[in-house]
Image: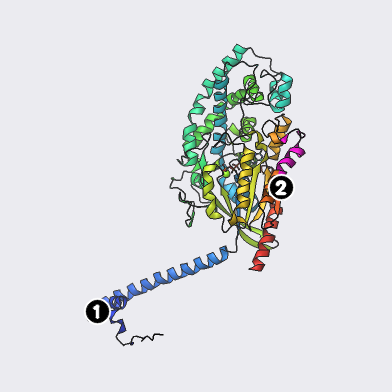
């Protein structure tokens, strides 16, 4: 054992203390010097007190935020995560959606211009092909591309309702009309790059599939020059590291006020001038044949806006809530949205994390795993005939199952409340009604009936099995069949899910 000696305390201990030396008055201090010194000391004390107060507020915020609910929305790209986030926003922070309503116009115009380009690309790709041959990539098409009017009426009732009365056109007349429409719509296609640049704030992401536009959290506020919402982004470094929260801090793009945005106003005028031509193109017999032959496959949102072209392209257009729910824009990184949710008479702050689902984005999810309370995993069951943009060899259902396996098996997420949304059931219904056969893409489906219940139960069984195989902790999997663009149905599911997440949260809080 050793003994130590304490140093002797002397009256002159502050002689060597640099701070004491620095603030000690000089021996010949004048009255004016003394005044200045005292003022400086008072200012230093004010600053120090402010810092102490800030630290104490930060500690309190941190203590409180540990009691918040953290909910992750996970799933592949296009699975419906941001759409579900909009539904949460509608329920728990409707004013913020109101404030950003007009900023969605730009996205919706973009959602119209891209399909117009895709239509012309399909015409170029299949021009001059023998119409009697089906697309080798579309094994569902068993009839001729030159489908009869009755075929078209069956497949696209909403289109043929207006088109069926017009007399059939000769091939030459059809071609001439397409050439004319291409010339008329060229100015619209020419604005696509500047519109993409405006929406994304110049963000350019390599490997973004079909050239879709990515946005980061807070893009609406930037494009409106507002700071309206409590949406925040946790700015990740490339290594996936975690940085502090900052409001709308993801890029330094200069704010543009939407009402005075010359570009958007020009595009609005242009789409208004072009709306009849776009409608004619969409209803053109050659385009209907390409769609019937599945040589032209547009996504559900593109079809939605094409079907509503006159309304959406008219002067003075303000997006409806339904339009906003259908608008498509890819999420970049992780966007945090904060809501106060009242459940069973208690108000708790929820942090909802909406992630980018494309493969190149998934590494950004990991820093959010360790303090998550709940996950809603979205699997779009309509994707059975689709492949990933990032990897055209991977079937979308297969990718969803692989991703769900990784989420179920991740040790950081073992205790997290797990909810599965088998989403886009409305699109699944439409595809089955159009006769797009499951067996052609998912061979193991075999000869089961090509009906909604049988298909959805088949997919559900696969997801349930993945969960069972990776469920050491015996947690419950809550599954819902959803169409998250359907506000009424989704509202009731969100209430149900919030309730069960909150119950689990309370149970855990009681154990702590
Ligand atoms: N008809 C229909 N459309 C849906 C449904 N869910 C999502 N969509 C549409 O599908 C598109 C993609 O949805 P998003 O919510 O943007 O997808 P996401 O999962 O956020 O995609 P990333 O941000 O790329 O990861 C949007 O245009 C939505 O309107 C649904 O249940 N039914
Ligand atoms: Mg998204």
Q: Is residue 95 left or right of residue 55?
A: right
Answer with the quadrant where ligand 2 appears in the image.
Answer: top right
What is the quadrant of residue 506 in the picture? Answer: bottom right
Q: Quadrant of the C terminus?
A: bottom right
Judging from the image, what secondary structure is the residue with disc 1 in? loop
Q: Residue drawn at (57%, 32%), measured in percent from left and top?
A: 112
Q: Quadrant of the N terminus?
A: bottom left
Q: Position of residue 503 (x, y in %)?
A: 69, 61
**Residue holding disc 1:** 26
Q: Residue furthest left?
A: 28
- Does mark 2's beta carbon lie closer than 8 Å to ligand 1? no
Residue 454 painted magenta? yes
Q: Main secondary structure of the magenta part?
A: helix
Q: Position of residue 93 (x, y in %)?
A: 61, 52
Q: Residue drawn at (58%, 24%), measured in percent from left and top?
A: 277
Q: Nearer the viewer, residue 356 or 347?
A: 356
For residue 215, say whether it is visible. yes
What is the quadrant of residue 379 in the picture? Answer: top right
* Relative to 435, residue 478 above or below: below
For residue 217, say whether it is visible. no
Q: Which residues are magenta?
A: 445-461
**Residue holding disc 2:** 480
Q: Residues within 10 Å of mark 1 (few under 14, many from 20)?
A: few
Q: Position of residue 247 (x, y in %)?
A: 49, 54
Q: Position of residue 54 (x, y in %)?
A: 46, 67
């Amino acid at each position: 054992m050793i003994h130590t000696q304490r140093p002797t305390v002397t009256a002159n201990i502050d002689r060597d203390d640099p701070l004491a030396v620095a603030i000690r008055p000089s021996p010949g201090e004048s009255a004016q010097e003394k005044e200045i010194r005292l003022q400086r000391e008072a200012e230093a004390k004010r600053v120090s007190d402010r810092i102490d107060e800030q630290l104490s507020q930060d500690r309190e915020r941190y203590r409180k935020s540990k009691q918040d609910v953290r909910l992750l929305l996970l799933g592949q790209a296009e699975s419906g995560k941001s759409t579900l986030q909009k539904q949460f926003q509608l329920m728990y922070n409707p004013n913020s959606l109101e404030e950003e309503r007009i900023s969605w116009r730009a996205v919706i115009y973009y959602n119209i211009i891209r399909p117009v380009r895709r239509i012309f690309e399909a015409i170029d790709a299949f021009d001059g092909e023998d119409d009697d041959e089906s697309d080798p990539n579309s094994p569902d098409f068993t009839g001729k591309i030159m489908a009869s009017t009755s075929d078209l009426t069956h497949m696209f009732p909403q289109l043929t309702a207006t088109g069926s009365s017009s007399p059939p056109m000769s091939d030459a007349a059809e071609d001439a009309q397409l050439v004319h429409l291409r010339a008329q719509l060229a100015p619209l296609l020419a604005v696509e790059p500047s519109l993409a640049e405006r929406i994304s704030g110049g963000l350019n992401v390599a490997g973004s599939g079909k050239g879709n536009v990515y946005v980061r959290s807070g893009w609406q506020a930037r494009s409106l020059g507002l700071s309206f919402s409590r949406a925040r982004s946790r700015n990740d470094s490339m290594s996936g590291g975690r940085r502090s929260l900052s409001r709308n801090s993801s890029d330094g793009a200069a704010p543009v006020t939407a009402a005075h945005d010359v570009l958007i106003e020009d595009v609005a005028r242009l789409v208004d001038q072009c709306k009849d031509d776009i409608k004619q193109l969409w209803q053109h017999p050659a385009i209907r044949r390409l769609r019937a032959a599945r040589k032209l496959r547009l996504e559900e949102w593109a079809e939605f806006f094409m079907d509503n072209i006159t309304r959406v392209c008219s002067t003075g257009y303000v997006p409806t809530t339904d339009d906003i729910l259908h608008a498509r824009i890819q999420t970049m990184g992780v966007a945090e949205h904060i809501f106060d949710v009242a459940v069973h008479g208690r108000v708790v702050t929820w942090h909802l994390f909406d992630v980018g689902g494309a493969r190149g984005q998934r590494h950004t999810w990991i820093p959010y795993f360790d303090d998550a309370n709940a996950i809603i995993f979205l699997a779009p069951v309509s994707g059975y005939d689709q492949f990933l943009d990032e990897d055209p060899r991977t079937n979308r259902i297969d990718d969803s199952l692989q991703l769900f396996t990784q989420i179920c098996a991740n040790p950081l997420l073992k205790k997290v409340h797990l909810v599965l949304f088998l989403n886009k059931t409305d699109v699944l219904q439409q595809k089955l009604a159009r006769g797009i056969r499951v067996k052609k893409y998912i061979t193991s489906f075999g000869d089961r009936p090509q009906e909604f219940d049988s298909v959805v139960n088949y997919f559900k069984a696969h997801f349930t099995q993945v969960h069972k195989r990776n469920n050491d902790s015996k947690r419950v999997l809550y599954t819902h069949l959803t169409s998250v663009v359907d506000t009424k149905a989704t509202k009731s599911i969100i209430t149900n899910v919030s309730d069960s997440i909150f119950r689990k949260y309370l149970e855990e809080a009681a154990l702590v």
